[in-house]
Image (cartoon, grey):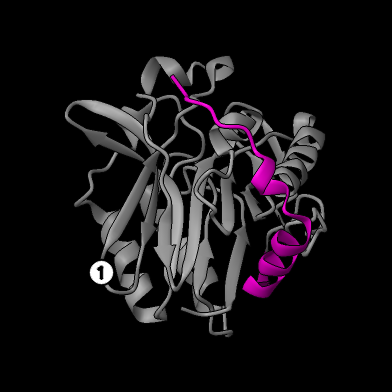
Amino acid sequence: MQDTLKIAIIQSDLIWENPKENREMFSKKIASISDKVDLILLPEMFTSGFTMSPENTFETMKGDTINWMLKIALEKECAIGGSIVIKENNTFFNRFVFAKPDGTLETYDKRHTFTLAGEDKVYNAGEKKLIVNYKGWKICPLICYDLRFPVWARNVEDYDLLIYVANWPKPRISAWDALLKARAIENMSYCVGVNRVGNDINGHEYSGHSGAYNGLGEQLSTFNEGEENIAIINLEKTHLKDIRTKLKFLADRDSFIIK
């Protein structure tokens, strides 16, 4: 167990439907990280962009990208996470993969598929929330559209860190900023959002706005608008302990059942 968790947030453009070139691109970015970090975070569908043609880029849980993530985790002695297109039992998933340096994997399938883009028609929605236990930290990874649904993110597990990986477009970026901050405040948790930049083949523009917020909603990082960059963020467990002990807001949370 450790009190500090050092995270590398990689805000990047993506190469459309080309897993090999995206892996090579991220390998170079990751190699440039000189700090010793505990966790590297990549955007949603980081090998393909937000494609509605999964048959062009899908992989399996024994595929090249999973092996690449495990290799990076081993070499950098840290965990790495992001979402990719996975095919399993003849079904496609937008799956977040958390690869640990000990060679183990934990996964979360996006629950709220983005109906506006037709994601619900080609990807199967997940049914289970994931809490990763890593270095004494309880981490809850979610994906993009999940951000709009606070009940799904509600901190009933006393997690320490909430993560959103995304392809969130520029026209609605003010909602991204506001909701990341809100999720941190209402859950008394760190909240980290990793978004892409650039333009995809469908003409959608992405401006980034990746960021980290503490349990009071104070922003810990900033990215220049639309620019690729890597931010290193230190999260402190003592911050969460102090505010939860003093303010006790989570003790008044509602109980509910999600159907």
Q: Residue at x 32, y 63 (%)?
A: 68
Name the side, left or right, on which 91 lies relative to 157: left
**Where on the picture, by quarter, is residue 70?**
bottom left
Residue 42, above or below 142:
below
Q: Nearer the viewer, residue 106 or 188?
A: 188
How many residues crowd mark 1 within 10 Å: few (<14), some (14–19), many (20+)?
few
Residue 19, above or below 205:
below
**Does any portion of residue 131 appear in the rendered image?**
yes
Residue 100 x, y percent position in the rendering? 35, 67
Q: Residue at x 48, y 60 (%)?
A: 138
Residue 142 x, y percent position in the rendering? 51, 42
Residue 226 x, y percent position in the rendering? 76, 50
Q: Residue at x 65, y 47 (%)?
A: 251
Which residue is under mark 1? Answer: 103
Q: Residue at x 56, y 31 (%)?
A: 255
Q: Nearer the viewer, residue 181 or 155?
A: 155
Three-letter residue code for mark 1: Gly
Residue 28 x, y percent position in the rendering? 50, 71
Q: Indicate yes or no whether the magenta region holds residue 60.
A: no
**Residue stretch rendered in magenta on the structure:** 230-259
